[in-house]
Image: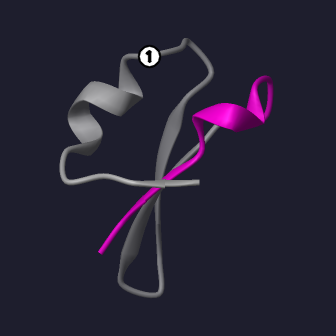
C-alpha cells in the first residue's frame, strides 16, 4: 500500500479504483487489481 499526497491522480490509474474514507483516512481500493491500493492521512 502506497501512502500518497495526491489521491486524485491515483483514482485515474485504473477503471476499478474507488476512493473510500474510513476513520479519518482516505483510501484508494481496487478489487480487480489490489496493487493499486493507496492511503492518505
Quadrant for the N terminus in the image: bottom right
- Work out which residue is located at the far right of the displayed protein and give it: 32
Residue 6 at x, y percent in the picture? 19, 45
User: Magenta span has 35?
Assistant: yes
Residue 18 at x, y percent in the picture? 52, 38
Kindly identify the residue that appears in the image at 38 percent across and 29 percent down.
Answer: 11
Vertical placement of 19 versus 26: above or below? above
User: Magenta span has 6?
Assistant: no
Kindly identify the residue that appears in the image at 59 percent across and 33 percent down.
Answer: 36
Position of residue 19 in the picture relative to residue 5 (left or right): right
Q: Which residues are magenta?
A: 31-41
Kindly identify the residue that appears in the image at 69 percent across and 34 percent down.
Answer: 35
Vertical placement of 36 versus 12: above or below? below
Figure disc tally = 1
| Secondary structure type for disc 1 | loop
Kindly identify the residue that appears in the image at 29 percent across and 75 percent down.
Answer: 41
- Work out which residue is located at the far front of the displayed protein and give it: 2
What residue did someone put label 1 on?
13
Residue 40 at x, y percent in the picture? 33, 64
Alpha-carbon neighbours of circle 1 within 10 Å: few (<14), some, or many (≥20)? few
Position of residue 19 in the picture relative to residue 34 (left or right): left
Q: Quadrant of residue 7?
A: top left
Position of residue 31 in the picture relative to residue 18 (left or right): right
Residue 31 at x, y percent in the picture? 78, 35
Amino acid at each position: 500500500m502506497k501512502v500518497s499526497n495526491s489521491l486524485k491522480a491515483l483514482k485515474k490509474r485504473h477503471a476499478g479504483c474507488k476512493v473510500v474514507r474510513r476513520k479519518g483516512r482516505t483510501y484508494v481500493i481496487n478489487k480487480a487489481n489490489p496493487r493499486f491500493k493507496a492511503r492518505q492521512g
